Amino acid sequence: MRVPIIAGNWKMNTNIPEALALVDGMLSPLDGIKGVEKVLCPPFVSLQAVGDKIAGTSVRLGAQNMYFQERGAYTGEISPVMLAGLCHYVILGHSERRQHFGETDELVNRKVQAAVSHKLVPIICVGESLAQNEEGLTNSVVRLQVKAALQGLSPDDVKNVVFAYEPIWAIGTGKAATGQGANAVIGLIRATVAGLYDRQTAQGLRIQYGGSVTATNIAEFIRQPEIDGALVGGASLKAEEFLRIVEQTAQIKGAGTVSR
């Protein structure tokens, strides 16, 4: 059974005191929820502070981005060497990185390879734009992104990877995909991985849905057989709502318990 994973991507929100206050508002009950892997991804400036706060709990820490070079004259970038030992996960290829900062499939792949080589677990984001969706290109776009992201990775490497299907048109818009639609695309991702490697590798791969996920609609996604969790944006900045998302995931997947 794939352990469901809920990750909160705080994006460019919260300073250090705000980040710690957010953690304080949910840490105890969040730690008590079993059967779900819980990940918090604050901005870089808060990684150490949040990491210290959640140390010794079941909550894991993730970074929001990473460059592929270990060191050098890359002003403003964060390297895998800096993150190794500090956090467990790193979000790579998010649509906002692709859209606003020009990240290509090739660059995402280099980052994925660097993350894996430094024992960081990449959460690889893939997804189509509204125009691509309306033109019926969703499957071809997502399939290409998956193949590009995994270039050069072995089956053992893929065991330490998480995918997140994030349709660009649903991120931050309040317009989520349907559970059935997201399940179909995530099934396509799994089938693509099976074609690249084997069925066993694909069946072990955890794939999240992301895109305007809330406590109101999470159940629609988590009930789908191919969906293993969610990459949560705005709702992860509200302690009570994020808790409700994780609680519902534990209850619906039937693998965990809720302490409150």
Image: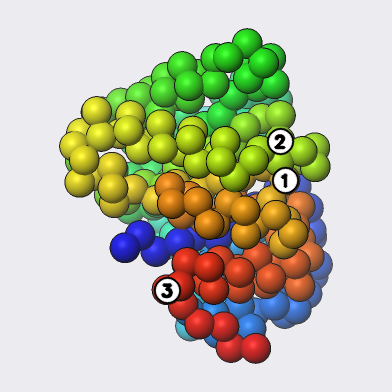
Snapshot colouring: rainbow
In the rendering, at what x and y percent does residue 165 appear?
53, 38
Towards the viewer: 105 or 50: 105
Q: Residues within 10 Å of mark 1 (few under 14, many from 20)?
A: many
Q: Which mark is residue 127?
A: none
Towards the viewer: 138 or 85: 138
Mark 2–mark 3 distance (CA, rounded to whole Å): 28 Å
Figure quadrant of residue 197: top left
The answer to whether marks 1 and 2 mark residues whose Cβ atoms lie closer than 8 Å is: yes
Mark 1–mark 3 distance (CA, rounded to whole Å): 25 Å
In the rendering, at what x and y percent does residue 147 appear?
35, 24
Q: Is residue 199 left or right of residue 176?
A: left
Earlier sequence position, callout 2 versus callout 3: 2
Vertical position of residue 197 compared to residue 36: above or below: above
Is residue 260 visible to us here?
yes
Amino acid type of disc 3?
Ala
Q: Nearer the viewer, mark 1 or mark 3?
A: 3
Amino acid type of disc 1?
Ser
Vertical position of residue 108 compared to residue 212: above or below: above
In the rendering, at what x and y percent does residue 181 appear?
57, 36
State the residue lying farthest toward the bottom: 260
Amino acid type of disc 2?
Ala
The answer to whether marks 2 and 3 mark residues whose Cβ atoms lie closer than 8 Å is: no
In this figure, which residue is indicated by the disc labeled 3? Answer: 255
Which residue is rendered at x = 62% and y = 15% of the image?
A: 132
Q: Secondary structure at mark 2?
A: helix
Q: Is residue 13 left or right of residue 141?
A: right
